């Protein structure tokens, strides 16, 4: 079972939501603490702000310098990570049971009192700018960014989470402090704790470090515009004559995580192009049968989230295989929409999904992250138990239906990057 004990949902008086589960197998406790803040809520001229804030979250508080924080973590062998992503920012902590109470105090200090010191900001910003310059040399990443920009025009999902050199260079430490003050409030905080502590003690410890944190009475998340799936094909060619390989992405807007077709599409993904081994069609045919690539895949559910993710088919191949590779991917997308999948394909896909599901719960940190995901998307506290049944219930007819509903080969975005002419057709 993913959780040996029941999961308890607790709402603190200041609005903080906590998901607590005792897992006594090992003397380890894991915590995830996230706020609804990320690049989704940035303005375009501040792209990269949330990501940089996440990097700097552990650079010192009002009580502890960055070096003291690092030494406190290192002395216990614990793992502390801070992050800023697309929809969420925060931290994760994994510690031995006996060390957890003290380290929880440190984690709470970071969430409440990080101060983003001036002398730490410039080096962090410089490192990020160097990373962005290096990123610009990665053709596959450049192609993926261009694909997102076409699929999500004018939407935050169309921008890299890490931002751009021009926007990151303009950020100031005051920008970070202002975003932190606005979004890091208890009534925007979600915490999951899983490990070898009684739930009552987990709740008591949380009350000790968070009870006196006043909520923000007028807190509201910024409004994010909806995004619509394209109705006509789009294309872009990015010439990189100094590279040897071309990177091709085809696809369009996908689905949200809460879409009722999610589980049928998850099965479709495994059959079409998103499983290890020899079962997925696109890797088997393009890589193994035709010898066009080492890396190729396709999926629609991998990026499904609060906003619709992307349906994308990818292949990295030699320039001379461009036309053949695109045609082969299009053929497999169309075949998925025209034919019932074979019984053995369906059985293999469902067996893979239900059999591999347990690997999402190998550690308490994975279990805590799972609780965060189920809460954010409203999947229900029994989702771990229901998931195998939801997958097993998918039929070949349902896979055909969702393929026809959600795959549109007549209106694909196609991005090609590498040693090709910028005038070449996408």
Image (cartoon, grey):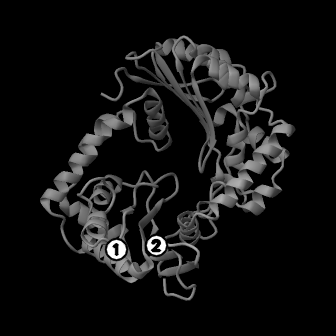
Give the x, y percent position of residue 407: 36, 70
Disc 2/disc 1 C-alpha distance (Å): 10 Å
Q: Are marks 2 and 1 in contact (CB under 8 Å)?
A: yes
| Residue 351 shows up from this direction | yes
Is residue 219 among what the camera can see? no
The quarter of the displayed image where residue 55 is located: top right
Q: Secondary structure at mark 2?
A: strand
> Which residue occupies the foreground of this view, 295 or 88?
295
User: Which residue is under mark 1?
Assistant: 329
Seen in the image, is 344 located left or right of residue 330?
A: left
The quarter of the image holding the N terminus is top left
Find residue 53 and name its label.
none
In the picture shown, does residue 298 fall above or below 118? below
Write down the residue under mark 2: 248
* Residue 160 location (% of width, % of height): 62, 59
Q: Residue at x 26, y 64 (%)?
A: 284
């Amino acid at each position: 079972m993913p959780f040996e004990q029941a999961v308890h949902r607790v709402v603190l008086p200041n609005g903080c939501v906590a998901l607590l589960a005792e897992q006594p197998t090992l003397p380890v406790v894991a915590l995830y603490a996230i706020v609804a803040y990320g690049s989704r809520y940035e303005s375009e001229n501040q792209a990269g702000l949330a990501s940089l804030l996440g990097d700097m979250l552990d650079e010192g508080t009002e009580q502890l310098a960055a070096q003291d924080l690092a030494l406190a973590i290192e002395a216990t062998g614990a793992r502390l990570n801070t992050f800023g992503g697309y929809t969420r920012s925060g931290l994760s902590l994994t510690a031995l049971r006996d060390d957890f109470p003290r380290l929880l105090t440190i984690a709470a200090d970071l969430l409440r009192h990080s101060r983003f010191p001036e002398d730490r900001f410039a080096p962090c910003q410089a490192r990020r700018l160097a990373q962005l310059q290096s990123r610009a040399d990665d053709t596959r990443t450049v192609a993926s960014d261009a694909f997102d920009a076409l699929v999500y025009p004018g939407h935050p999902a169309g921008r890299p989470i890490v931002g751009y050199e021009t926007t990151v260079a303009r950020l100031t430490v005051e920008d970070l402090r202002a975003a932190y003050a606005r979004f890091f409030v208890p009534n925007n905080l979600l915490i999951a704790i899983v490990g070898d502590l009684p739930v009552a003690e987990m709740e008591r410890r949380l009350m000790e470090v968070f009870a006196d944190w006043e909520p923000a009475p007028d807190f509201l998340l910024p409004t994010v515009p909806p995004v619509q799936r394209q109705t006509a094909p789009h294309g872009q060619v990015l010439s990189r004559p100094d590279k040897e390989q071309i990177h091709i992405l085809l696809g369009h807007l996908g689905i949200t995580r809460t879409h009722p077709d999610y589980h049928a599409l998850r099965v479709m993904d495994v059959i079409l192009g998103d499983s290890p081994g020899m079962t997925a069609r696109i890797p088997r045919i393009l890589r193994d049968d035709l010898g066009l690539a080492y890396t190729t895949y396709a999926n629609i559910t991998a990026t499904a989230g609060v906003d619709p993710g992307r349906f994308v088919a990818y292949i990295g191949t030699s320039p001379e295989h461009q036309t053949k590779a695109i045609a082969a991917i299009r053929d497999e997308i169309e075949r998925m929409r025209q034919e019932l999948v074979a019984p053995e394909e369906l059985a293999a896909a469902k067996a893979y999904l239900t059999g591999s599901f347990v690997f999402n719960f190998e550690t308490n940190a994975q279990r805590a992250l799972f609780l965060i995901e189920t809460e954010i998307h409203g999947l229900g506290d029994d989702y771990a138990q229901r998931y195998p049944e939801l997958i097993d219930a998918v039929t070949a007819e349902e896979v055909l239906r969702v393929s026809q509903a959600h795959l549109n080969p007549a209106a694909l975005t196609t991005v090609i990057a590498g040693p090709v002419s910028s005038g070449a057709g996408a």
